[in-house]
Amino acid sequence: MAKLKFGVVIFPGSNCDYDTYYALRDVCKQKTIFLWHKEHDLKNVDCVVLPGGFSYGDYLRSGSIAAFSPLMQEVKEFALKGGLVLGICNGFQVLLELGLLPGAMLRNKNLKFLCQFVHIRVENDKTRFSHRAKKGQTLKIPIAHFDGNYFAPPETIAEIKKNNQIVFRYSDAEGKINEEANVNGSAESIAGLINKAGNVLGMMPHPERASEILLGSEDGRVIFESIIAKLN
Amino acid sequence: MKVRILVSLKDSVLDPQGQTVKNALHTLGYGSIRDVRQGKVFELELEGVSEKEAEKIIPEISDKVLANPIIEKFSWQILEKG
């Protein structure tokens, strides 16, 4: 299988950049480079990954300042042309602020920073990010965020559902969706959302932190493997 | 010119921080407080800008940067002219 080229974007305050780089380069054996947010060149990568962290200290709103960085204008153009973009945690927040995904993030319903393993249920296994998983399957992947309470106005939620854009929802280990499993209070228990065109995915859980059994779970790898299988 | 911009969550969006502040006030005995909404304040100093120009610039930057129009609303006032 030919190696793909992944580009992991670094913002000031990113802190999952090396974990993501490691998961892609060392675990998934793909060519992976870092992209600095001040650059203007995506260096011909096949897939852009926006890692987790606290870009710009979460000043103003999580992900908002990062969305204005020079490289993100290139990422926007890349995405609008069909390029694959994966936003993890803070990366998801950046994609929302950039307008590549609909909706916004509110503070978690219990006002706590949540750092724990959760289960997410695969709702759509037809996407380029999830086709190696099975619909209804649960994945054990950790979250670590303060602002992960997904919100969108009712008409946007209706549109998202109609287009089958919900890729992952918070569930219990058995795959049941309920208030308790929806730890941050997200609308429709949304944990992962794809754009209408199917090339931009945002997710709050951290697949890179669940890419090896040593880390407590390797369930997150299926997302990277889906991308790799699709691009090859 | 000095301008103050207030950004807060839209009425249709639940404000858990405001709710928590309200509950704390109730605990302290201020039972008359019916609701609390929390927001952000920005004070901007503008140079060489007329009031008319400010009327164009302020809503523009509020919409584009200071507030996220999906969840937030803004209002503004001129604190100091000139």
Image (tube, grey):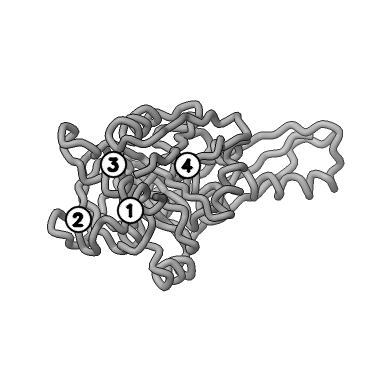
Q: How many marks?
A: 4
Which label's residue is closer to the chain start, 4 or 1?
A: 4
Task: Say which amino acid is labelled 3.
Answer: Ile
Q: CA distance from mark 4 to mark 1?
A: 20 Å
Give the residue drawn at x 66%, y 34%: B43
Left or right side of B73 for A113 = left
Find residue A18 and report its image quarter. top left
Circle 4 Cα neighbour tier, 10 Å, few/some/many (<14 / 14–19 / ≥20): many
Task: Say which amino acid is labelled 4.
Answer: Val
Is disc 2 on the same chain as disc 3?
yes
Residue A226: percent from left, percent from top: 32, 51
The residue nearer to you, when weighing A157 against A12, is A12
Circle 3 Cα neighbour tier, 10 Å, few/some/many (<14 / 14–19 / ≥20): many
Left or right side of B48 for A173 = left
Q: Secondary structure at mark 1?
A: strand
Eyeballing the image, is B20 above or below A52? below
Q: Circle 1 sits on which residue? A: A191
Task: Say which amino acid is labelled 1.
Answer: Ala
Q: Circle 2 sits on which residue? A: A138
Find residue A179 and report its image quarter. bottom left
| Residue situated furthest left in the rendering | A174
